Every structure is written in structure tokens, then in C-alpha cells.
Amino acid sequence: MNIRPGGPYHFCLKSIITLLIFVLLAGLLLAPPVRALGAYTVVIIPFENLSSRPEYNWIGESFAEGLAELLDKPGLVAIQSDERNVAYKQEGFPPTAILTRATMIKLAERAGASLVVMGTYRISGEGRESTITVSAKTVNIVEGRLVGREFSRGSALLELQRLQGELAYDILYQSNPALPFSRDQIISQAVQVPIGAFENYIKGTVTLDHDARVSFFEHAIKETADKTKTIYAAAAFELARLKYESGEYKEALELFEKLDQKATRYDEAQFYIAISLDMTGETGKALDVLQKLAQTLPLYEVYNNIGVLFIKKKQYEEALKHLKPAADAAPRDTDVMVNLGYAYYLAKDFANAESVLKKEIDRRPSDGEAQYLLSKALAAKGDSAGANAAADQAKKLLPAYAQWETKGMPAISRMKTAFSKANYYRYRRDQDGRLGPPSGSLAQKTQPDELLQSARDAFSAGRDEEAMSTLVKMLEIAPQSYEAHLLAGRIHERRGDLDRAITALKAALFWNPKLVSAHVLLGRISVLRNDCAGAQVSATKALQLDANDQDAQALRRLVDEKCKSAN
């Protein structure tokens, strides 16, 4: 299939290379001996097609996809294509963006990479006689130098995957001569998938037309099965996701379930499997999948969906156990907050239902379902005036209001059918055991680190408004940062806004349950509110985590003094 010139994978790297050349030459002359990659992270930019033959533009993405798989080895983390695309989206770059040097660095920093692989290729000849010539280099963007030598080689186009294996081995070896893999092992991995299947898969990933994508992935899966008797996991996942997004849940299930735990996107597949099971009436199985997934992927969308499924099973206390941490982690997510209010309502905890729903309606007063639910919670409490006011709003906003009044309120819990890819990849990166503290110049601060330090400085200087403004920016980039949530809690506590302080501290503990300082501050707030039970729980948890922590010990003494005097 033809891919137009200037499309998503037709990148102009000439200007990048020109801009870098003097820095790179200096780096080569002055650079120290090459080190092992250690905790380095690498992103591969799709290679540029120099042959003016757009039908071969797919090859540029094939290098990015293939190298990402081959370079992901112990000691080196390769950013996969899907995660790279998240970085594009976060930076606001369209798929057709021309990558300048500054853009490349920005994307690499956004993705947490320190190394960038870039390259070009030319195609000559026709059909099976076609040949390819490749030039590629790896740049350490932190140190401003080339890593190893430039790779320049050619082969028959049918040997594309072998060529990618040779390039991957050179990158790995030049960066780490103690590499525990042979050239043959890397090449063997590169050619596992038949070349025709690989081509179809890559074309499926770069094509926008839905039906064409389905056809490419189906052909990739079939050829792999016919020739190797194995499942092409990457193609199966992409086809399954297309089926899922089209509402073909049964077909999606059959494909997702072909992936084993070794598949790169196994966890992501489990999330979609659970939704598909629920959509096909298998709520119990869906719940089992999500509860298992929560142990390895504790995203708030997973917790939200577990809560929703428990609501379906009328187990409201269990629903609350999962919706509360989801709300702590995502207090601005409308679906989560409405679900929490709904669970409180069904559990006949009308006071908490009112509290949650009023806060959510303050943020989003146009939510007719929330207004309706609030009216029922207030009516159950005996607040007729409040119930009537909420009902009046629901009448204006909810087209089905009259039907609900006559036939009863339907189930209104809200499933998350997708999750934040940015949060997902950040969490995986945080959990990757290969990523210890980088050495040398790689210990430079990334943008979130700089924002956090700026917020800390403003907080220390008493500039709370500036600190909060900075934290808001940071949490848009790194919502999983427990340090940012903790600092926000401290700011709110200093301002006397204890409700917001509690919300922020709970978010910090969602991402890091072992954060002693958050438990301590929650305990102090509980003391201020004369909540002895809550203070005791916080003090106990803090001391269980670190019996020698002076702040935790001080909290214990404060709790003992205040609560004894209260009794």
C-alpha cells in the first residue's frame, strides 16, 4: 500500500544531522571510552526514506519497531513504538511533524530516553531484486556525542530483518562489549517472523484506513501461523484492539486470549479482556481478571472498573473498597467520583453520597445523572428542599428524567473502557528493575524533576500560590508523582484547607503506600479534627513502616496525649 510522501514516517533527518555534526565530531574527539549502557533508555526514530519511493515509507517504521524489540535487553530499556507515540501526543506534535534536533531532544526527554537512534535508507531495484542501503547512528543526547561508530551497510530488501538484527547487535556491542548475546542470537530473534508477515504488520500500524489495517493484520497472523505454527503476538494484539474498538467483543476476546504472559502488551490485553468479558455477560470472569491485574497494574481505571463490577454484583462494601482508592488517585475524574457517590447511595450511606456528589457537581454542574442521584440521596436524608433543587437541575439536564421517575433509576455506574497510556508507561518504567539510578551526566533532572524542585523552593519561601501552580503543571505530566501529591497536601494543610489536604495525601499514598510522611501528616490532620480513630490508624501505619522515624514517634506521642485527654 502506498504511503504518501511527507506522511507520518517520512522524516527529514538531514537538517538534524547537519545541526549535530560539529557537536558530534567534538564528542568523538573528546569522549571517554564507551561505557556499558547500564540504566540507559533508548528511543528509535523512524528512519528517513531517501529514495523518493513512497511505497517503501513503511520501512522507516519497521526499523523503529524492529530495533525497539531487539534492543530491549538487560541493562538497556528500549521505548516501544506505542510509548514513543504517547510522547508525540504529549508534546502536541502531529504524526507528520518534521523532527528537528530540538524536537528530537524534547521527545526523548518526554519519553525518559537518553539515547536516540536515527537513520536513513535508500531502495534500489524492483521486486524481489530490490536492495536497501542503510546508514544509522546512536546519539547520547545528554552528553552530546555519538555512541560507537556510524552503521552503514546494504543488503537485499528480502534480508531487511537480518539487516536490522546486525544493526541492533552493533548498537548493543559498541555500547557494551560485555554483551551476553552473540550476533547470531540477535539476528535469530530478528528473523523469527516471516518477512511478508512483518511487512504486513508494519503497514497495518502506519495505515489509517480501518479496513486496510484489519486486512494487513489478518494476513500477518495467517502467514506467521502457516509458516511457523506460532502466533504473531504483536499483530494479534493490534487486530484484537481494532475489534474491541468496533464493539466486536467476542472476536476481540478470541484474539486477546492468544497472548501469553511473555507478550510485550500482555497487561494491556488483560484490561481489554476484562471489558470484553463484561460486555459479553461474563461479569464474574471479568472481575477475576481485573482483581489479578490490579496486583501488577494498579492504575485508577483498573480500580474503578473493579468497583463497578462489584456494584453489578450488589457487593457495595467491596465496591467502595476499590472506588475510594480510585477517587484518591483521580479526584478530578468525573466517572470515578460519580461511581463513588453511586456506591455510597446504594450502600445507604447517604451522607457520604451527598458529600461526594456535591463536590463533583461543583466541578461539573452539567452532569444530569449526578444531579438526579444527588436528589435521591438528599431525599433519603429527609432534605426535601435540597432534593427538589437537585431534581429541578436534573429535569433540565437529563432527557430521560421522566422515564427514570416512572420506571426507576437504571444502573448508572461508569466503566473505563480505556486507560491513560501516559500513566501506564510511567508506572511500567517505575517498576522496571533495569532502571536503577543512572550514573554520571545521566543523573540530570528531567522536566518533572525540575518542576518539583521549583515547587519545593516556592513552598519553602512561603509562595504557596506559585508552588501550587507549578504542581498543577507537574501533575499534568506525571500524575503518578507521590512527591507532588505530598507537597500539595502540605500546602493545603498550611492554608487550612484540610479536605483538599486529605485528598492530596490519599493520592500520594495510592501511588506509594509506604510514604511515612504522608501517614504522619494525615494523622496530624485527624488530631486537629478530633478524629482519634483516624489518628491512631495513621500513627500505627507510620510506625509499622519505620519505627525509628522521629515524626512518626512524635505523632504517636501527640495522639496519646490528645486522645487520652479527649477521653
Image (tube, helix red, strand yellow):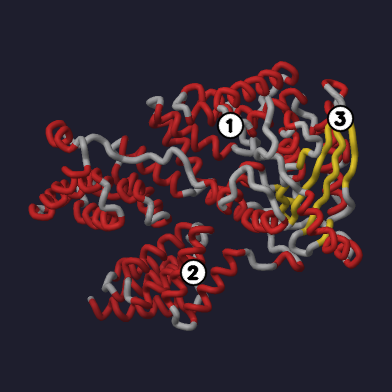
**Which is in the foreground here, disc 3 or disc 1?**
3
Q: Which residue is mark 2?
A: 470
Quarter where residue 207 is shown:
top right
Q: Of helix, strand and loop, which one carries label 2?
A: helix
> Which residue type does callout 2 highlight?
Thr
**Which is in the foreground here, disc 2 or disc 3?**
3
Picture layout, residue 399 above or below residue 392: above
Q: Residue at position x 51%, y 70% from top?
A: 546
Q: Position of residue 183 (x, y in %)?
A: 88, 40
> Which residue type does callout 3 highlight?
Ser
The disc at residue 86 is: none
Q: Which residue is mark 1?
A: 208
Horizontal relation, residue 17 to residue 283: left or right: right
Mark nearer the N terminus (3 vs 1): 3
Q: Of helix, strand and loop, which one carries label 3?
A: strand
Q: Position of residue 118 (x, y in %)?
A: 77, 48
The residue closer to the viewer here, 255 or 312, is 255
Picture layout, residue 434 above or below residue 123: below
The quadrant of the image that shows the C terminus is bottom left
Quarter where residue 5 is shown:
top right
**Do the residues bearing badges 2 and 3 touch, measured as CB atoms within 8 Å?**
no
Rounded to the nearest angstrom, the CA distance separating label 2 from label 3 is 53 Å
Q: Position of residue 337 (x, y in %)?
A: 33, 51
Q: Residue at position x 44%, y 45% from top?
A: 301
Rounded to the nearest angstrom, the CA distance separating label 3 from label 1 is 27 Å
**Do the residues bearing badges 2 and 1 touch, measured as CB atoms within 8 Å?**
no
The disc at residue 124 is: 3
Q: Residue at position x 67%, y 18% from top?
A: 222
> Which residue type does callout 1 highlight?
Leu
The residue closer to the viewer here, 332 or 101, is 101
